[in-house]
Amino acid sequence: MTTVFGIKACDTMKKAFTWLDGHGVAYDFHDFKKLGVTRESLEKWCDACGWEKVINRAGTSFRKLSDADKQDLDREKAITLMMATPSLVKRPVLEHDGGVEIGFKPERYGQLFPR
């Protein structure tokens, strides 16, 4: 089963949903705004992809962090920040067949879900 984690209103999420729907990929959606994100999930994603890829440093939420929060960022601090502010997680996060994919790239989704 495939699960997509993210925030429904995010433009990148909308692109991923459109791609998945257009290619007939069945998935469950986990909305961070409604359901939050668990430490277990964040640790799993950081183990699979690296915490540097999981945290979205380019987004508005990251820019709004205090300088103290941005300094000396490491895995543990990043996980703590992402738990407190799930919009810091780069979206979408796709769990499939035991794997994890961070972000949306149509060519990568095409490799993961060949027709």
Image (cartoon, rainbow, N blue to C red):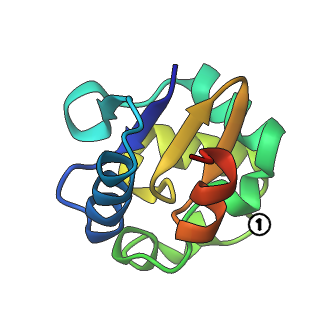
Seen at 35% across and 67% down, the residue is: 12
Q: Position of residue 64 (x, y in %)?
A: 36, 75
Residue at x 56%, y 46% (from the top left corner): 115
Q: Could you tell whether 42 is left or right of 47 in the image?
A: left
Residue sitting nearer the eye, 31 or 38 = 31
**Compared to 1, does 9 lie above or below?**
below
Q: Report the residue at 26% width, 70% height from top.
A: 11
Query: In the picture provided, is 23 more to the left or to the right than 73?
Result: left
x, y percentage for residue 108? 65, 62
Compared with 99, 54 (above or below) is below
Circle 1: is it few (<14), some (14-19), or many (20+) Cα within 10 Å? few
Residue 3 image offset from top left, x and y in percent = 46, 29
In the image, residue 108 sits, relative to residue 48, either above or below, namely below
| Left or right for 84, reference 40 | left
| Mark 1 element type | loop
Residue sitting nearer the eye, 34 or 105: 105
Is 31 located above or below residue 52 in the figure? Answer: above
Question: What residue would you read off at disc 1?
Answer: 72
Give, as a three-letter code, the residue at label 1.
Asp
The image quadrant of residue 67 is bottom right
Q: Nearer the viewer, residue 72 or 29?
A: 29
